[in-house]
Image: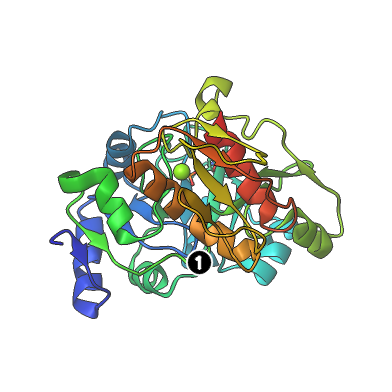
């Protein structure tokens, strides 16, 4: 497909050029595919919101190569540095206090006093970030409220001709969005992901809380529907029904028509990787309803349950 560009030095140079002109590209990260733009440019950031149809009050995550540029944009607390050493680059996003003289576009963090920052691990995006003199504002590369993309074709499905350049990086290693942790005052998980509250607590030797409203900065009406395939989802189901797609997990399910197993061997990591792909496939097949069995609530299973719950809302 024309809009999709293979990973090569020529295409990375092309990507850099587009970003320097404050235009937007699609690219891979280890979590999900993202829509990237120059985080220092109001214009670039506004283009991201417009393309995604994302409400301007929902801030974006700023992606850095390392601490060099970040030091100028945010205050690096002791808690942050401890976690950074252990988990970055990787699928963990930190909420930090923004510096007054930071160059980050105030549109990117919805005019808040804080910014969300991440250091992605995927080789391709790291190569690109290493070549840039600015960080990238990157939300997931899907229309607001829809399911996140986990391969370059998913991104094409979302935006078609509206996005002319997508860097291809194959399938995402993790398949779910990053964990988001607020490190100001009490430590709070705003969004569960591959890095668990337990792991964070172990490094910081402090209690880690879960925010029950998934995010304070978003008005409740808007997070109600999120990660949504656009058809009704029923959770914790035990039985199939003729018309619904049935999402299962583990080896005790015998393959049947309408059945989609997230991981036959019962691996939660594999289930996370397959979740969004499965939701997209079910929608494409034209099912009008989805039923899902209970998924274990441990490790990345916590994040899977979080996304399913929001998708079912
Ligand atoms: P997405 O861009 O779809 O991966 O989502 C990014 C998540 O990070 C959303 O839930 C945002 O509300 C959250 N986020 C980004 N910036 C901030 C911030 N400064 N404070 C709190 N949450 C934030
Ligand atoms: Mg998103």
* Picture coordinates of residue 96, whole percent (x, y): 62, 48
User: For mark 1, does the 10 Å Cα neighbourhood hold few (<14), some (14 to 19), or many (20 or more) residues?
Assistant: few
Label 1 element class: helix
Which residue occupies 38% across, 33% down? 54
- Does any portion of residue 79 appear in the rendered image? yes
* Picture coordinates of residue 281, whole percent (x, y): 38, 50
* Picture coordinates of residue 60, whole percent (x, y): 46, 43
Q: Quadrant of the C terminus?
A: top right
Q: Nearer the viewer, residue 152 or 182?
A: 152
Which residue occupies 41% across, 32% down? 288
Extreme residue in the top direction: 221
Q: Quadrant of the N terminus?
A: bottom left
- Does any portion of residue 91 appear in the rendered image? no
* Picture coordinates of residue 119, whole percent (x, y): 52, 63
Q: Quadrant of residue 223?
A: top right
Left or right: where 135 falls relative to 264? left
Which residue occupies 41% across, 58% down? 150
Left or right: where 119 falls relative to 82? left
Q: Nearer the viewer, residue 24 or 222?
A: 222
The residue singled out by tag 1 in the image is: 68
Above or below for 57 versus 239: above
Does the Cβ of the disc 1 residue fall within 8 Å of ligand 1? Answer: no
Which residue occupies 44% across, 64% down? 172
Extreme residue in the left direction: 2
């Amino acid at each position: 497909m024309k809009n999709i560009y293979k990973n090569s030095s020529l295409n990375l140079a092309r990507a850099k050029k587009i970003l320097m002109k404050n235009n937007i590209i699609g690219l891979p990260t280890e979590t999900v595919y993202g829509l990237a733009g120059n985080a220092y440019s109001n214009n670039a950031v506004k283009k991201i919101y417009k393309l995604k149809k994302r409400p301007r009050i929902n801030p974006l995550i700023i992606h850095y190569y390392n601490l060099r540029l970040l030091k100028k944009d945010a205050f690096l607390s002791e808690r942050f540095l401890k976690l950074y050493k252990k988990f970055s680059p990787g699928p963990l996003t930190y909420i930090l206090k923004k510096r007054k003289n930071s160059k980050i576009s105030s549109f990117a963090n919805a005019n808040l006093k804080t910014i969300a920052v991440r250091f992605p691990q995927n080789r391709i995006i790291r190569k690109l970030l290493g070549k840039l003199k600015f960080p990238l504002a990157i939300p997931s590369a899907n229309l607001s409220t829809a399911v996140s993309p986990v391969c370059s074709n998913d991104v094409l499905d979302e935006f078609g001709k509206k996005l002319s350049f997508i860097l291809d990086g194959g399938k995402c290693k993790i398949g779910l969005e990053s964990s988001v942790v607020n490190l100001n005052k009490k430590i709070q998980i705003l969004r569960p992901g591959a890095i668990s509250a337990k792991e964070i607590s172990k490094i910081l030797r402090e209690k880690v809380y879960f925010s029950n409203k998934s995010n304070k900065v978003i008005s409740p009406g808007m997070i109600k529907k999120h990660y949504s395939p656009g058809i009704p989802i029923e959770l914790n189901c035990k039985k199939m029904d003729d018309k619904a797609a049935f999402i299962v997990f583990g080896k005790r399910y015998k393959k049947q028509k309408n059945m989609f197993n997230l991981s036959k061997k019962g691996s939660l990591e594999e289930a996370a990787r397959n979740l969004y792909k499965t939701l997209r496939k079910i929608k494409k097949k034209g099912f009008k309803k989805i039923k899902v069995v209970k998924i274990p609530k441990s490790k990345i299973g916590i994040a899977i349950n979080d996304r399913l719950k929001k998708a079912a809302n």
